[in-house]
Image (tube, grey):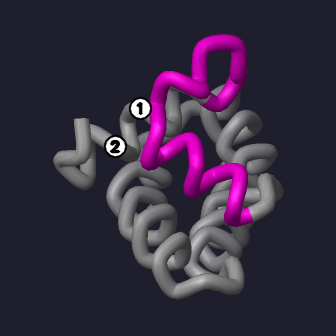
């Protein structure tokens, strides 16, 4: 089980740093590198969904957190904003 979990973490880290726009690669990738090692399985499940969100949507959430109210990714986006000192 641990090996499979580590594979998921490595895959998520790669996908977070290879999104398509350099800005989101940097924002999401640095956050992933800093937090994936301590993420619980439930958090990793949500993070794996988050990295599938198109860059324009994710960028809008990062830049305007008022749009996060009813989104399941709000804890991760808020944590990412805090990590990058945007909050």
- In this view of the protein, which residue sits in the foreground, 1 or 53? 53
Mark 2 residue element: helix
Q: Nearer the viewer, residue 29 or 20?
A: 20
x and y, in percent, of residue 24 in the image: 53, 71
Q: Is residue 1 visible?
A: no
Where are the magenta residues, as a range? 55-73
In the picture, measured across the screen, residue 57 lies left or right of residue 79, that is right
Q: Is residue 86 magenta?
A: no
**Mark 1 lies on residue:** 78
* Spot occupied by residue 48 in the image (x, y as percentages of width and height): 75, 49
Instruction: Describe the element under mark 1 as helix, strand or loop.
Output: helix
**Chief secondary structure of the magenta portion:** helix
Specify the label residue 81 is tagged with.
Answer: 2
Seen at 79% across and 61% down, the residue is 54
Closest to the observer: 78 or 38? 78
Residue 12 locus on image (x, y percent): 67, 64
Label 1 packing within 10 angstroms: few (<14), some (14-19), many (20+): some
60 in the magenta segment: yes
Q: Are marks 2 and 1 in contact (CB under 8 Å)?
A: yes
**Which residue: 51% across, 35% down?**
76
């Amino acid at each position: 089980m641990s090996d499979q979990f580590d594979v998921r973490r490595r895959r998520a880290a790669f996908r977070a740093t290879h999104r398509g726009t350099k800005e989101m690669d940097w924002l999401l990738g640095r956050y992933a590198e800093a937090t994936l090692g301590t993420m619980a399985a439930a958090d990793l499940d949500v993070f794996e969904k988050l990295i599938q969100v198109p860059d324009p949507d994710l960028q809008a959430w990062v830049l305007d957190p008022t749009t996060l109210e009813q989104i399941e990714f709000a804890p991760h986006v808020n944590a990412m904003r805090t990590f990058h000192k945007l909050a």
